[in-house]
Image: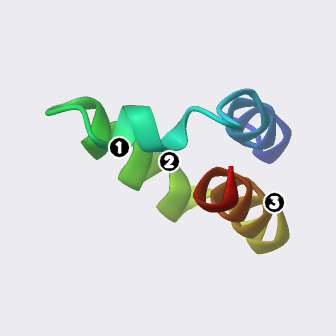
Amino acid sequence: MEPEDRNNIIKSLKGKIMKLALSDYVCLFVVCLLSIVDNTKLVTEVSQHQSFA
């Protein structure tokens, strides 16, 4: 998977991270995905958007 693909997945999860993170097994996917994305600015933007929404 290319970095651009991972960034697109993160962008598509904007506004849905909290709902996914509270799920039993999907939270593992979210943690794994956020840990391998090398774009910290994007990850911060998505997670802050969710926490303040």
Residue farthest to the front, as pictured: 53
Mark 3 touches mark 1? (CB < 8 Å) = no
Instruction: Name the residue nearer the viewer: 36 or 51.
Output: 51
Locate residue 4, reporting x and y percent.
85, 40
Res. 21 image quadrant = top left
Rounded to the nearest angstrom, the CA distance separating label 3 from label 1 is 17 Å
Helix, strand or loop for disc 1 = helix
Q: Is residue 6 left or right of residue 22?
A: right
First along the sequence among labels 2 and 1 = 1
- Kindly identify which residue carries mark 3: 42
First along the sequence among labels 3 and 2 = 2
Rounded to the nearest angstrom, the CA distance separating label 3 from label 2 is 12 Å
Helix, strand or loop for disc 3 = helix
- Frontmost of labels 3 and 2 is 3
- Kindly identify which residue carries mark 1: 21
Q: Quadrant of the N terminus?
A: top right
Circle 1: residue type: Ala
Instruction: Name the residue nearer the viewer: 15 or 39.
Output: 15
Helix, strand or loop for disc 2 = helix
Locate residue 48, reporting x and y percent.
69, 65
Circle 2: residue type: Leu
User: Which residue is depicted at the point 63% across and 51% down?
Assistant: 50
- Kindly identify which residue carries mark 2: 33
